[in-house]
Amino acid sequence: MGFAEMEVPVRFLQIGGGNMGGALLERWVDQLSWSFTVVDPGQPALPEGVEHVPTLNRLAGTAFDALIVAVKPQILDEAVAGLVHHLKPNAPIISIAAGVPCERFEKLIGAHPVIRAMPNMPVKVGQGMSGLVGNSLVTDKIRTQIETLFAPTGHFIWLDDEDAIDRFTAIAGSGPGYVFELLRSYAAAAANLGFSEEQGERMAAQTIKGAIALAMSSDASPEALRNAVTSKNGTTEAGLDVMRREPGFESLLLEGTKAAYDRAVELRA
Ligand SMILES: NC(=O)c1ccc[n+]([C@@H]2O[C@H](COP(=O)([O-])OP(=O)(O)OC[C@H]3O[C@@H](n4cnc5c(N)ncnc54)[C@H](OP(=O)(O)O)[C@@H]3O)[C@@H](O)[C@H]2O)c1
C-alpha cells in the first residue's frame, strides 16, 4: 500500500535537513498537514513543527509512510543503512540526491516506488521548478500524492526517463546559479556606468523580474517581445549588437548547459 492510501496524517521520514532539504520542509510544514521527522546528525535549522533526531536508532518501532532522501550522494549508503526497518511495506521513496538512479534505492532498500525529484533553490519562496521521474512501481495514486507534496514548492513537471533528470538538472537545477551570475554581472555593468552597488543591484533585479513577469503573462514569443522593445538604431539595438557577438548569450548558454549535463552524467552514481 502506498502513502496515497494511508489514513491521514501521513508520516514522512526525511534523511538530511541541510540547504535543500530544509528549504523544502519550510514549504511543506507551512502548507501541508502531514508530519515530518528529520534524521540529521548535525544541528540543522529546521522549521517549527518538524521532529529532529540525530540518528535512526532514536526511531525504534516507528514505521513511516514515505521516505525523503536529502543527503549528499557520497554519504547515501551510510545514511540509508537500516532504514528499511522504519518504512512501511511499499512506502514511496522520494530522492533529491543528484545523479543517484532509482535502481540504487531498489538495491539499498528493496522494491519500493521511487521518485527522483530535482528541485531548484527558489522552492524556498514557493517559486521552484522541479523535475520528477518515477520507477515502474509508482502508481497513479502515488503520482497524485507527489504532486500534492510538490505543489507548495512552485512548479513541477514529470519527465520521461532518468536521463531527462540529468538534462533538467543542467537547465533548471543549476539554473538559479546562472541567473545569480547574470544578476551579478548586470549590477557590475550598472556600477561601470556610475551607479552605486545598491542602485545597480536593484535596477538589475527589478529589470530581470519585470521582464520575466511580462514574458510569463504574455502569449508572445521571447523573440517577439525582444523585437517589440528594440527600435531600429536605438539604444537597445546598440546593446544587443554587442551582446550577440560570438560567443554571445545563446552560445554561452548552449555550451554552459551542455557542460553541466556532461558533468551530471559523469557524477551518475
Ligand atoms: N542545493 C541545491 O540547490 C540542490 C538542488 C537539487 C538537489 N540537491 C540535492 O540535495 C541533496 C542535499 O543537498 P544540500 O545542498 O541540501 O546539502 P547539505 O546542505 O549538505 O545537506 C545535507 C544534510 O545531510 C546531513 N547528513 C550528513 N550525514 C547524514 C546522515 N548519515 N544521515 C542523515 N543526514 C546526514 C548533513 O549534515 P552535516 O552538514 O552535519 O554533514 C546536512 O545537514 C544532495 O543530494 C543534492 O544533490 C541540492
Image (cartoon, rainbow, N blue to C red):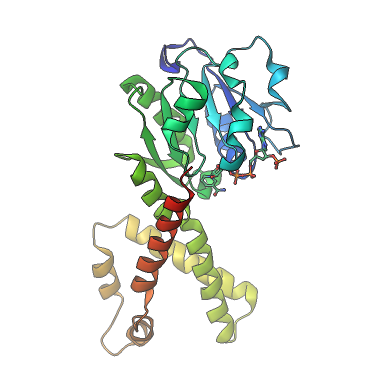
Which residue is pictured at 48% across the width and 63% down the height? Answer: 178
Where residue 142 sits in the image (x, y, percent)? 38, 22
Rendered view: 191 above or below 255: below
Camera-side residue of 154 and 105: 105
Where residue 182 sits in the image (x, y, percent)? 49, 69
Q: Is residue 231 left or right of residue 134?
A: left
Q: Quadrant of residue 102?
A: top left
Q: Is residue 36 left or right of residue 243?
A: right
Which residue is pictured at 37% across the width and 78% down the height? Answer: 248
Which residue is pictured at 41% across the width and 57% down the height? Answer: 262
Camera-side residue of 221 and 141: 141
Instruction: Specify the quarter for ligand 1.
Output: top right
Quadrant into which the N terminus falls: top left
Q: So how many labels did they put on this image? A: 0
Where residue 128 sits in the image (x, y, percent)? 47, 46
Rendered view: 184 above or below 19: below
Where residue 41 sits in the image (x, y, percent)? 73, 33
Camera-side residue of 137 and 148: 137
Camera-side residue of 89 and 221: 89
Rendered view: 19 above or below 11: below
Q: Quadrant of residue 62?
A: top right
Residue at the outermost bottom position: 233
